[in-house]
Amino acid sequence: MPDARTILFTSAFVLGKHIRLTDAQWIHSRKRRELHNQLGRMRATLSEPDAVYYVLGEDSYHYYRFYPQTPVSSKYMLVITKHLDGEGFIITTFYARRISKPDKVLLYESLSQKPQ
């Protein structure tokens, strides 16, 4: 049984927030078959995203990073987090065809890893 208190990683990421991934959150994410063995990419998406958006209606942060090869073709990995009292945690992760921008505020954008 997953333990919500067991932390797989925590680190300071691009917005200066510490974000953690617990065992329970990782098991939830791995329910998507394409996310098996993608823990390293989740961490890379948080540490070196192409873009980070804030979604006011959800009070969440969307970290995007493009990968030319994934288990489901070339896509963006999207890691959705919440930040509370200077700390953050991962809500969910999945691959997306594009960056969805409605109702989002751009907080960070990298020019180094744009899809071709």
Image (tube, rainbow, N blue to C red):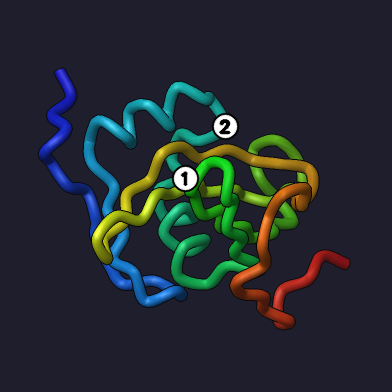
Q: Which residue is mark 2?
A: 34
Disc on res. 47: none
Q: Is residue 32 above or below residue 39?
A: above
At label 2, the amino acid type is: Glu
Q: Is residue 6 above or below residue 67?
A: above
Numbered disc 1: secondary structure: loop
Q: Which residue is mark 1?
A: 38
At label 1, the amino acid type is: Gln
Q: Residue at x 32, y 49 (%)?
A: 89
Numbered disc 2: secondary structure: helix
Quadrant where the C terminus sits is bottom right
Judged from this view, the residue extending furthest toward the right is 116
Task: State which quadrant residue 23 falls in.
Answer: top left
Can you give x and y, in whole percent of width and height, for residue 68 in the image?
A: 74, 56
- The answer for how far apart the CA atoms under marks 1 and 2 are is 8 Å
Quadrant where the N terminus sits is top left
Q: Is residue 2 above or below residue 112?
A: above
